[in-house]
Image (cartoon, helix red, strand yellow):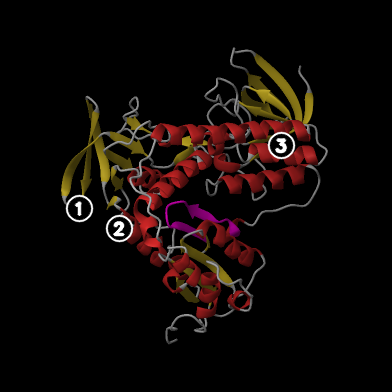
Amino acid sequence: MADKFDVIVIGAGPGGYVAAIRAAQLGLKTACVEKWIGKEGKVAHGGTCLNVGCIPSKALLEASHKFVEAKHDFDDIGIQAGDVSMDVKKMMARKDKIVKNLTGGISGLFKANGVTAIDGTGKVLSKSQVEVTDQDGKATTYEADNIVVAAGSVPVEIPPTPLKDDLIVDSTGALEFQETPKRLGVIGAGVIGLELGSVWNRLGSEVTMLEAMDDFLPMVDTAIAKETQKLLKKQGLDIKLGARVTGSEVKGSEVVVKYSDSKGDQEMTFDKLIVCVGRRPYTQGVIADGVEVNLDERGFIQVDDQCRTSLPGVYAIGDCVRGQMLAHKASEEGIMVADIIAGHKAEMNYDAIPCVIYTFPEVAWVGMNEQDAKAAGIKVKTGAFPFAASGRAMANNATEGQAKVIADAETDRVLGMHIVGQHAGEMIAQGVIALEFGSSAEDLALTCYAHPTMSEAVHEAALAVEGHAIHMANRKKK
């Protein structure tokens, strides 16, 4: 039997590594198990987010956006950039360097906080035992008073489009293209699909997105989703809704995709195809047979509001449990669980988790959207303000989009905030704080905002809830 720990965390993604660091900070003897092998052939911490998700995709999004700005927008503000080109291989190398720095940084944080890093594949054997199998197949059993499963998720594959070399790829493969494909197909117009489609569209690909659902971004407020769709179409993304993929065939260096829509059976030919139809929990093999940790029919580990599983002393967090598959949600769950294990009182407000799509402009939201609030029988009042009327947005050459505040018509309490615009992902934190503290729209309206800032759009939207916006004509209240 190997060392015994107070806490063993399985998985060093944004949920697992945060849980491990927090537990160690609270005086608990902690270990974190990770199996991810990086490009250098060594275990790399950070999970999907740092290695093939949030961070590398944002590096590509930022680089491609700057390229578009230099190529098309600099002239508007007086900068003569001349002939601008993109070195895709250099862009990819920069992305890899960022990933290496951050994954290495987690290893350094483990050492600084006294977390024991264990390389290998972890499996829960009982409420107090974890088996770790290293790359050579050697299995070692560790004991722990508490176990936290943070195994994450993996991309969903669909039968009509099996992955094929570098022609049909998932989101991971889409981060590794070494040249810009001329014709790019993307299956799925959700968060990941829109971000990856945007990257390669900016770099010159003819991007067609095939989305099976009839509604575009149904989780987003209808007005914001409609405006987002219009802006992305203007940028060149061909988003086909109600397009259900039925098959694919690789012909040489091309991919022929068959799909059906309202017009019948269709087919298109692409040079590359990205499959972005969602993610599924990675739980197969993480729990040993016979261990009484319950999973639902989709493979998610069942937990209560404080991430306890059905087996005392075993917790599960992040993408392998219910809720939104978001890195920051996993991190906050990790902190909550570590606090609970250490004997502190802790809970998490699942109604105040922000979501962001890092297209340009960004799309961000928190809380309820207007259509869901109304469906729940809640009378709402709303206020919106366009960035076209914002002085800072004009100065930034970024006047597209709007900010919208949704409040309870009877109590004035903020129910949600939705933004499409430059830096929406930063501004949405104001909505998160408002929800966390139970703020009213009036609270936001009475707050002094710096001028000139993009955030003034949030202020004006809050003022507009009662028809008091200053820098636009207010709608007449019925």
Quick one: label 2 or label 3, which is nearer the N terminus?
3
Residue 303: x %, y % from top left: 62, 44
- The residue under label 2 is 234
- For disc 3, the neighbor class at 10 Å (few under 14, some 14 to 19, many from 20) is many
Tell me if residue 361 is in the magenta stretch: yes
Q: Residue furthest right?
A: 27
Q: Amino acid at mark 1?
A: Ser
- The residue under label 3 is 20
Which one is in front in this view, the residue at disc 1 or the one at disc 2? Answer: 2
> Residue drawn 35% across and 63% down?
226
Residue 425 — which label?
none
Q: Amino acid at mark 2?
A: Lys
Q: Is residue 41 visible?
A: yes
Could you say which quadrant of the image residue 164 lies in?
top left
- For disc 1, the neighbor class at 10 Å (few under 14, some 14 to 19, many from 20) is few
Q: Amino acid at mark 3?
A: Ala
Span colored in magenta: 352-365
Could you say which quadrant of the image residue 31 lies in?
top right
- The residue under label 1 is 262
Q: Is residue 298 visible?
A: no
Residue 95: x %, y % from top left: 50, 36
